[in-house]
Amino acid sequence: MNKIYIAATDELFLKDLSEQILQEIPETEIIDAHPEMADLILADESFADLQKLQDNIKKPVILFSSKEDTSEFADVVIKKPFTLSKFLWALENKKILPKVRRKECVNINEYILFPVQKEIISSATEKKTKLTEKEVDILKYLYQNQAQNVSKEELLENVWGYSAEATTHTVETHIYRLRQKVEENGKSQLIITENNGYRLNT
């Protein structure tokens, strides 16, 4: 991740962020043209041509936004205001991007998950099912950890972040509803319950 393009209309934000990145990660090069040549794009919500980035840029995009995570093209949305030191640490240690990018589809046995569209399709029956954001997050986390059985507590911590209203019963309910929506009469299992946890049927 050596070349970074920052898409921002706010010149002060652009200048300050560039300086902080170069100070913390001096081997990084901030480029001011040809975003398609960058390894990573940092985009501020104020940038006038976000639609152009969405349509033409295939590189990973991190969006800084004061709104909720409603982006259909960014791989990561960072809610403003954000802690700069945490962002720089994640950037330097390559912890900033998920293993499954939002623009990519994910193959899970006979199923194809489209995270951006929040859809999952069965290649066997061609059934298309709309998913909630949380259901997509569950499937992405299980996919990232498909080599192991994922406990309810781990899902709770990493998908819900231990929010006050969430319990392991919340996890159970979401998994049950997800399976009911996607699986055909108990056939073609998507998620397997095992050892008081879950794993994908890959």
Image (spheres, helix red, strand yellow):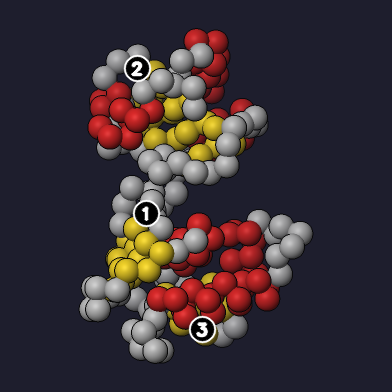
Relative to 37, is 78 above or below?
A: below
Q: Is residue 145 visible?
A: no
Residue farthest to the right, as pictured: 164
Relative to 61, is 192 above or below?
A: below
Badge 2 or badge 1: first in the primary sequence: 2
Please state, as top left, top right, bottom left or bottom right, where the N terminus lies in the image.
top left
Q: Position of residue 44 (x, y in %)?
A: 48, 25
Please state, as top left, top right, bottom left or bottom right, where the C terminus lies in the image.
bottom left
Relative to 88, is 128 above or below?
A: below
Q: Which kind of residue does numbered mark 2 sit on?
A: Ile
Q: Position of residue 160 (x, y in %)?
A: 63, 59
Q: Which residue is mark 3?
A: 193
Q: Which residue is mark 1?
A: 117
Q: CA distance from mark 2 to mark 1?
A: 31 Å
Q: CA distance from mark 3 to mark 1?
A: 26 Å
| Residue toward you, 91 or 139 | 139
Q: Is residue 69 visible?
A: yes
Q: Which mark is residue 31?
A: 2
